[in-house]
Amino acid sequence: VKKEQEQTQSRKSQLLSIMATTRRLGKELEDIRNSGIQHFRNLIVDETNILNWQGLIVSDCPPYDKGAFRIEIVFPAEYPFKPPKITFKTKIYHPNIDDKGQVCLPIISPENWKPATRTFQVIHSLVALVNSPEPEHPLRADLAEEYTRDRAKFMRNAEEFTKKYSEKRPVD
């Protein structure tokens, strides 16, 4: 009987945790939609699964200003106690984003994550990283080296790559 009570209690606490996560994400989603943020557009959230978001990163900075980049944000059930995971679904020529779309973004690394961090702040950090690569924390050493040693070549290659692979920029 005691084991059944413990299991029931465990299920209740899991359910309360999921409800708290859903409430928090609902509020954050509303805040982002009302913010008028220009660099994160076309936000799509599956209403049956608020833990999965998609949107477009729209940079104003060369070489990424010729297209838009679809990202997916997946929140763990333990959010905000564990960070979301961001994946680029659109290919991008960037030293901090690998060819699988994984991102090296310090704000969401397990050692830096704070439960008080909002998704809006994560998106802001991601846009800043896209606009200003950090070659000292690369996921693609070859691109970091090119960015550091021959910026003009990097910019040309990234612009061509953007024209070839990126999505259309949303029209206001």
Image: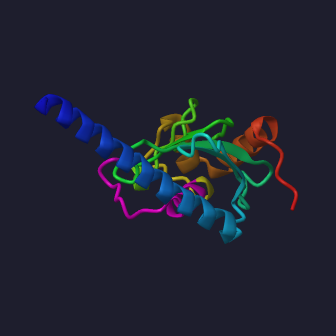
Residue 71, position as x, y percentages in the image: 63, 43
Q: How many marks?
A: 0
Tell which residue pokes out farthest to the right in this image: 171
Left or right relative to 3: residue 140: right
Left or right relative to 5: residue 101: right
| Image quadrant containing the N terminus | top left
Residue 172, position as x, y percentages in the image: 86, 62
- Quarter of the image for residue 164 reads top right
Is residue 128 among the parts visible in the rendering?
no
Which residue occupies 53% across, 49% down? 148
Q: Which residues are magenta?
A: 109-129
Residue 147, position as x, y percentages in the image: 57, 47
Which residue occupies 48% across, 59% down? 24
Q: How is the image coloured?
A: rainbow
Which residue occupies 61% across, 40% down? 48
Tell which residue pokes out farthest to the bottom in this image: 35
**In this picture, is 66 found above or below 160?**
below
**In this picture, is 126 found above or below 159?**
below
**In this picture, is 65 found above or below 3?**
below
Tell which residue pokes out farthest to the front in this image: 1
